[in-house]
Image (cartoon, rainbow, N blue to C red):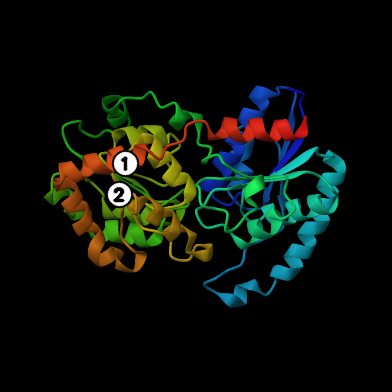
Amino acid sequence: MKGKRIIIAGGGTGGHIFPAIAIANAIKKAAPDSEFLFVGAKGKMEMEKVPLAGYKIEGLTIAGFNRSSLIKNIGLPIKLIQSFFQVASILKKFKPDAVIGVGGYSSFPVLRYAQSKGIPTFIHEANSFAGKSNIMLGKKAVKIFTATDGMEMFFDKKKTTVSGNPVRNAIAQMSVNRSEAIAQFNLFADKKIVLVVGGSLGAKSINEVIENHVDFFVKHDLQLIWQTGKPFFERAKKSCEGMSNVFVSDFIAQMENAYAAADLVISRSGAMAISELCIVAKPVIFVPFPHAAEDHQKANAMKLVEKEAALIVEDKNAMSELMNKVKSLIDDIQLQEKLKVNIKKLSVLNADEIVATEILKCLN
């Protein structure tokens, strides 16, 4: 197919960044002479991760609405206005044929401005409950791609395609076996492994539960792979000093190894985490982030719980309930197998290709 000049806007977390990169890679594969520019938020992880994937990125001076501290939102209108001037300059220089929004702070001003200039826009909505920005932007978008069905309540059905969430190739085409993966973490193949991952930035409440229960893993002859996120890393490292049954890291770049090694996963229920866990088919206990917009993490998790594909513990109950749930699941082989079979049914391996093909079809 003929190549296009495409801007991909969004970021903030791995759940937005990795699908964005996967979509760019898939478009590049189908139309090799395509050119890309990513637009993200200054100071956010996309400014580091996107260049590592081989793409250029421009940063906007923008922040999201802070739900926990209203006083921190005082400067938000000024930042939003400033970001529109930055977007105008970026689009004038790059002259895109299309703009793709993947969610995150920077997605809204870029797509809004592009729509005002008649540039075709596309949206990928990763969650089971659409955000207000995407609902608004969806009215003028050429096409909206969703992770799950049942999204007609948010978007025009005629413009909506259920694509699933694009995941990293290393996970979609995972070839590492369990014993190889376990060796990467200096753990033992004859003991069960619990993987704890709170998303690319970590999860304070989950981390605090694990910190308070590190002896649980010794007591029950379990091993732990613990991704803490940067803010909690030093504290976590100190809590499990000298413990040979624990691997702790602020960020695990090769998550395929962590998934392959794990017998059970404790995770936030961001869209990307769910998509990856469906593909690797692991028994999982979700602890949804309670302050996510529109409580979308709980909506994401409940989609799986209703299909008997996962378990859930609410964040407010994590300290009192999570480790009991881990123990009962580790002991229940039958339930583990049921969860694995049911979560695997929800996996989508070629979401990136579906999105890329549809976008190029609309543009060519």
Which quadrant is home to the C terminus? top right
Kindly identify which residue carries mark 2.
Answer: 308
Q: CA distance from mark 1 to mark 2?
A: 7 Å
Looking at this view, name the residue that lies furthest to the front.
158
The local crowd at label 2, few if under 14, some if 14 to 19, many if 20 or more residues have their Cα within 10 Å, is: some
Looking at this view, name the residue that lies furthest to the bottom.
71
Q: Residue at x 43, y 46 (%)?
A: 273
SS class, disc 2? loop
Which of 64/100 is in front?
100
Kindly identify which residue carries mark 1.
Answer: 342
Contact (Cβ within 8 Å) of mark 1 with mark 2: yes
Q: Residue at x 75, y 37 (%)?
A: 6
Relative vertical location of residue 72 with respect to residue 362 in this rendering, above or below: below
> Residue 246 got which mark?
none
Relative vertical location of residue 346 with respect to residue 307 in this rendering, above or below: above
Residue 54 visible to the viewer:
no
SS class, disc 1? helix
Q: Along the horizontal axis of the image, is 185 left or right of 85? A: left
Which of 142/292 is in front?
142
